[in-house]
């Protein structure tokens, strides 16, 4: 306990406790006060320490974003868990991720049994994430360098699309690549300010039911190579 207060001993267990606490506290807004067992087990299983630079490893299990280089971050564990929960991932699902970063969210989705297609605009991050995922045995994940605004039309339609960078509005190409009943989870709002996490579900007629979930702070979804 004392060591926790000093911030030196966050573990996968204390990270899970922090996620459960945040889920409870935000449950009235998110509609998900308790995350599913599969999501929580997966957050416990995937070693976050394997996704952060050497200097950040002592803090790997703290419930906050950490720098990963190239001006980018690994997202806060609670936010990763929440977005995963909102995607309602079934084993075998086909998921598109925009914003691979270090590949942590990619690994979480893979661990849940999804086939993941992930796009990252910073080429060296895409290369490093692909190698890391392969080394950890996540062979059902494919990473490519590029601008995720266009999605991945060759592999559409998707059961779920997760965007882990903030867009001023929902890119139309992404909605087009959702199957009927598919879910899109995306932070929408201005760069450098608070955005609103949104969950959209595509109806059979192509329209979407949208719900605003929670204020969040993401790096911007850029246009082209950074
Ligand atoms: N999913 C990551 C979060 C990475 S942060 C995790 O698990 O922690 C967001 C990432 O989105 C950054 O790596 C950034 O380079 C990337 N990004 C920004 N704009 C993009 C775009 N247009 N297309 C693809 N990736 C983009």
Image (cartoon, rainbow, N blue to C red):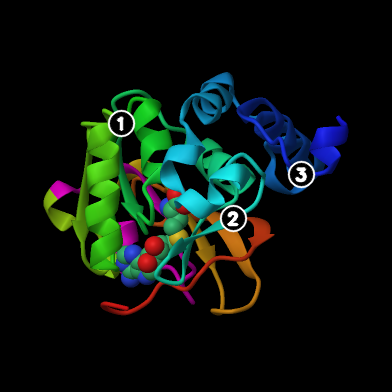
Instruction: Identify the image quadrant of the C terminus.
Output: bottom left
Gap between marks 3 and 1 measured at Cα: 27 Å
Seen in the image, is 32 located left or right of residue 120? right
Q: Nearer the viewer, mark 3 or mark 2?
A: 3
Identify the mark nearer the N-term, 3 or 2: 3
Does the magenta run of residues contain 220? no
Q: Compared to 148, does 19 lie above or below?
A: above
Q: Residue at x 35, y 54 (%)?
A: 100
CB of mark 3 within 8 Å of CB of mark 2? no
Gap between marks 3 and 2 measured at Cα: 15 Å
Q: Compared to 85, does 195 lie above or below?
A: below
Q: Which residue is mark 3?
A: 7
User: Looking at this view, is 79 or 75 the one in front?
Assistant: 75
Q: Is mark 2 within 8 Å of ligand 1?
A: yes
Quarter of the view holding residue 170: bottom left
Q: Secondary structure at mark 2?
A: loop
Q: Is residue 102 visible?
A: yes
User: Looking at this view, is 140 or 214 the one in front?
Assistant: 140
Magenta stretch? 155-177
Q: Secondary structure at mark 1?
A: loop
Q: Is residue 200 visible?
A: no
| Residue 54 x %, y % | 47, 49
Q: Which residue is mark 2?
A: 65
| Residue 194 x %, y % | 66, 71
Gap between marks 2 and 1 measured at Cα: 21 Å
Q: Residue at x 27, y 53 (%)?
A: 128
């Amino acid at each position: 306990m004392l060591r926790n207060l000093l911030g030196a001993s966050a573990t996968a267990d204390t990270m899970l406790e922090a996620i459960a606490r945040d889920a409870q506290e935000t449950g009235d807004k998110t509609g998900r006060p308790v995350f599913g067992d599969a999501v929580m087990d997966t957050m416990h299983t995937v070693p976050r320490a394997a996704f952060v630079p050497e200097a950040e490893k002592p803090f790997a299990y703290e419930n906050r974003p950490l720098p990963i280089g190239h001006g980018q971050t690994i997202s806060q564990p609670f936010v990763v868990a929440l977005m995963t929960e909102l995607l309602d991932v079934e084993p075998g699902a086909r998921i598109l991720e925009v914003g691979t970063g270090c590949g942590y969210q990619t690994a979480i989705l893979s661990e849940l049994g999804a086939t993941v297609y992930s796009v990252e605009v910073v080429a060296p991050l895409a290369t490093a994430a692909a190698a890391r995922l392969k080394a950890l045995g996540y062979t059902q994940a494919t990473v490519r360098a590029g601008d995720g605004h266009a999605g991945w039309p060759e592999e559409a339609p998707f059961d779920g699309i997760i965007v882990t960078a903030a867009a001023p509005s929902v890119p139309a190409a992404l909605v087009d690549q959702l199957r009927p009943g598919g879910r899109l989870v995306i932070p929408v709002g201005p760069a450098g300010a608070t955005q609103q996490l949104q969950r959209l579900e595509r109806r059979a007629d192509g329209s979407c039911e949208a719900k605003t979930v929670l204020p969040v702070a993401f790096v911007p979804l850029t246009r082209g190579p950074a």
